[in-house]
Image (spheres, helix red, strand yellow):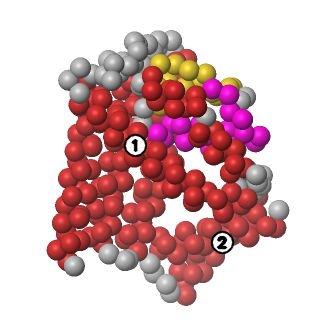
Amino acid sequence: MNLLIDSLTMVCLALGCFLGLTGGIGIYRLPDFFTRLHASSVTDSACAFLILFGLALQAGWSLVTIKLGLVFFFLVLSSPTASHALAKTALNSNQQPLLGREDKR
Amino acid sequence: MIKHIVYLASALGLFWLMLSGHYTGFMFGCATASIALTLFIAWRMDVVDDEAEPIHLTGQIFHYWLWLAMEVAKANLDVCRRIWSPKLDISPTMICLTANQKTPLGVMLYANSITVTPGTVCVNVEGDKLEVHALTWSAAEDLLDGEMDRRVCRLEI
């Protein structure tokens, strides 16, 4: 049972780190401000959830788990607000979004 | 009004219980005092109403969150795939949406759900018109289909 939880923790943390890295690389690769915002929202949602979930597995059923849950809850509440504020400010100060072509798929 | 005060007080009490971890008489006294102070400030600020404490949503919101979590997970996979793809397969789009919710709270919920999903960001809200920037054309089309809009509408009733 302990081994199962430990390995699950490892998988969650590794995936979370990978997603955080993906967000960083996305910020580097994507062409303009608005598209970069999408890359950072990957870090805010899935990456944060996986890392906090991995840590919660290690904490077991205790107050720490509840606090980790609250951290995630407030992150989910505040990150869209921050993204929206950033995007709106950028648009208001005449940052033109780069608009693209059709999907290739 | 009374209903909202009770709701806010119990939510604050629960919040204190989860954060504190020290359950002695003195700490409970402090908790009561701080909750009473918070209630008083909230009452003075006139934010004890349906908009600040959406009691009527409490029942169905968990079901909606579950659905939203699935959508966010799918969108995450999609955005990750596009970031790592060598060709950088993106097609940034701006679209205008009409929010069909009846209350400002519903529109807020809809706009925040759009923003929390990777690949779409709500840029501007005016009345019931939302301006949305999407990373890809397909993400924009998913929004135009209106599945999320309908689900938030159903929450409000």
- For disc 1, the marked residue is B74
Q: Residue at x 71, y 67 (%)?
A: B7
Q: From this viewpoint, which residue is outermost toward the front?
A: A105
| Residue A72 image point, x, y percent | 42, 56
Amino acid type of the residue tagged 1 in the rendering: Lys
Characterize the local packing of mark 1: few (<14), some (14-19) or many (20 or more) Cα atoms within 10 angstroms: few
Q: In this view, does B16 lie above or below B45?
A: below
| Residue B121 image point, x, y percent | 49, 31
Sequence-wise, the earlier of marks 2 and 1 is 2
In the displayed structure, does residue A58 sit left or right of residue A96?
A: left
Q: Give the range drawn in magenta.
A: B97-117
User: Which chain hosts label 2?
Assistant: B
Q: In this view, does B30 lie above or below B156?
A: below
Mark carried by residue B10 = 2
Q: Residue at x 46, y 45 (%)?
A: B71
User: Which chain hosts label 1?
Assistant: B
Q: In which quarter of the image is residue B75?
A: top left
Q: Can residue A85 be seen in this view?
A: no
| Residue A40 image point, x, y percent | 36, 35
In the displayed structure, does residue A22 sit left or right of residue B119?
A: left
Q: Magenta residues: mostly which secondary structure?
A: helix
Amino acid type of the residue tagged 2 in the rendering: Ser
Camera-nearest residue between B151 and B21 = B151
Q: Is residue B54 part of the magenta span, yes or no?
A: no
Mark carried by residue B8 = none
Mark 2 or 1, which is nearer the eye?
Answer: 1
In the displayed structure, does residue B15 sit left or right of residue A79?
A: right
